[in-house]
């Protein structure tokens, strides 16, 4: 019965678009998440996710397409936060807490003042991947290609910056430019993935696959690829579970990511487990 329901739904165009959107965003989030957690930017992705709701609210107030408004807003917001982190003496976690809490509060106030928004709050908070349009899919696929090319062409530099930034500077790497490019891509991935898992779950969507993949990786390149594969696999399984059990799609994807992580931890704790232990960050 469940299998028949899944097969029937997979014949529908909107379900096929949702599945491809999950694959694209899951792969991007997993790959960039591997760098995010090693650079201790997990809370930064959380702040980006919460700020996305403010970008959507501004788009609604201004009468613009919220999805199109979200992309430039996320980039400007990410670069602005990066500037504040570099030029203020506040603690990083405190500043990010202020930013994401404040932007979330502003977003709720703006939405309450607008009568233009016809969607549901749950769709913003937990995603609505079944509403993905062909234009959204093209955007996700294009961004996925850009992320893949960026990591392929700059993997060595990104690894060096992640492991030893001072050494990267000494070797002549354009550290600041590479960092800003990475932050910009991360902001765009978060913005595009909002429709997949929503504002509240976007941080988990980026972080969990990378944390799970970390337990199985010995080399950095292996780690990045495995994190991307976990993101893709979780999206596929999560969408199939969602279709078969009639569960919400975004939370189903994150639950599958969590299941992989918990299984990895459990296997890691078994006596004689071959899963690599004790290493803070994989190296190539």
Image (cartoon, helix red, strand yellow):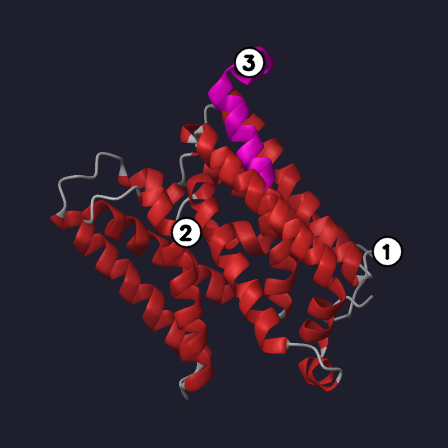
| Position in image of residue 175 (x %, y %) | 63, 77
What residue do we see at 29% from left, 62% from top?
A: 103
Quadrant into which the N terminus falls: top right
> Which mark lies nearer to you, 1 or 2?
2
What residue do we see at 58% from left, 50% from top?
A: 29
| Position in image of residue 282 (x %, y %) | 77, 66
Q: Secondary structure at mark 2?
A: helix
Q: CA distance from mark 1 to mark 2?
A: 42 Å
Mark 2 is surrounded, within 10 Å at the Cα level, by few (under 14), some (14 to 19) or many (20 or more) other residues, namely: many
What residue do we see at 21% from left, 39% from top?
A: 117
Mark found first going from the N terminus, 1 or 3: 3
Mark found first going from the N terminus, 1 or 2: 2
Q: Is residue 210 left or right of residue 131?
A: right
* CB atoms of marks 1 and 3 within 8 Å: no
| Position in image of residue 219 (x %, y %) | 82, 61
Residue under pointer 1: 274
> Which mark lies nearer to you, 1 or 3?
3
Residue under pointer 2: 71
Q: Quadrant of residue 90?
A: bottom left
What residue do we see at 42% from left, 40% from top?
A: 195
Does 131 sit above or below residue 86? above
Does 282 sit above or below residue 8? below
Segment tinted magenta in the rendering:
1-24
Closer-to-camera residue (210/64): 64
Q: Is residue 150 left or right of residue 16?
A: right
Residue under pointer 3: 11
Closer-to-camera residue (272/250): 250
Q: Is residue 2 magenta?
A: yes
Q: CA distance from mark 1 to mark 3?
A: 41 Å
């Amino acid at each position: 019965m469940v299998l028949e329901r899944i097969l029937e739904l997979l014949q529908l165009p909107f379900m096929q678009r949702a599945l491809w959107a999950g694959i694209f965003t899951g792969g991007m989030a997993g790959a960039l998440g591997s760098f995010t957690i090693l650079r201790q930017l997990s809370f930064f992705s959380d702040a980006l996710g919460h700020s996305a709701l403010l970008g959507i609210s501004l788009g609604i107030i201004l009468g613009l397409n919220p999805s199109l408004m979200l992309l430039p807003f996320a980039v400007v917001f990410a670069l602005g936060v990066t500037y504040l982190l570099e030029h203020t003496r506040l603690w990083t976690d405190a500043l990010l807490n202020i930013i994401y809490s404040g932007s979330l509060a502003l977003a709720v106030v703006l939405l309450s003042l607008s009568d233009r928004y016809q969607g549901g709050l749950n769709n913003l908070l937990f995603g609505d991947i079944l509403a993905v349009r062909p234009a959204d899919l093209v955007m996700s696929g294009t961004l996925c290609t850009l992320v893949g090319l960026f990591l392929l062409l700059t993997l060595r530099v990104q690894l060096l910056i992640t492991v030893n930034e001072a050494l990267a500077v000494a070797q002549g790497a354009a550290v600041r430019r590479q960092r800003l490019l990475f932050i910009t891509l991360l902001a765009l991935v978060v913005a595009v993935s909002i429709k997949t898992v929503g504002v509240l779950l976007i941080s988990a969507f980026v972080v969990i696959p990378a944390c799970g993949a970390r337990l199985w990786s010995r080399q950095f390149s292996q780690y990045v690829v495995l994190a991307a594969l976990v993101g893709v696999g979780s999206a596929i399984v999560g969408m199939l579970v969602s279709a078969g059990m009639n569960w919400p799609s975004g939370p189903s994807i994150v639950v599958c990511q969590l299941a992989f992580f918990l299984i990895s931890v459990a296997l890691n704790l078994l006596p004689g487990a071959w899963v690599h232990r004790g290493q803070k960050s994989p190296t190539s």
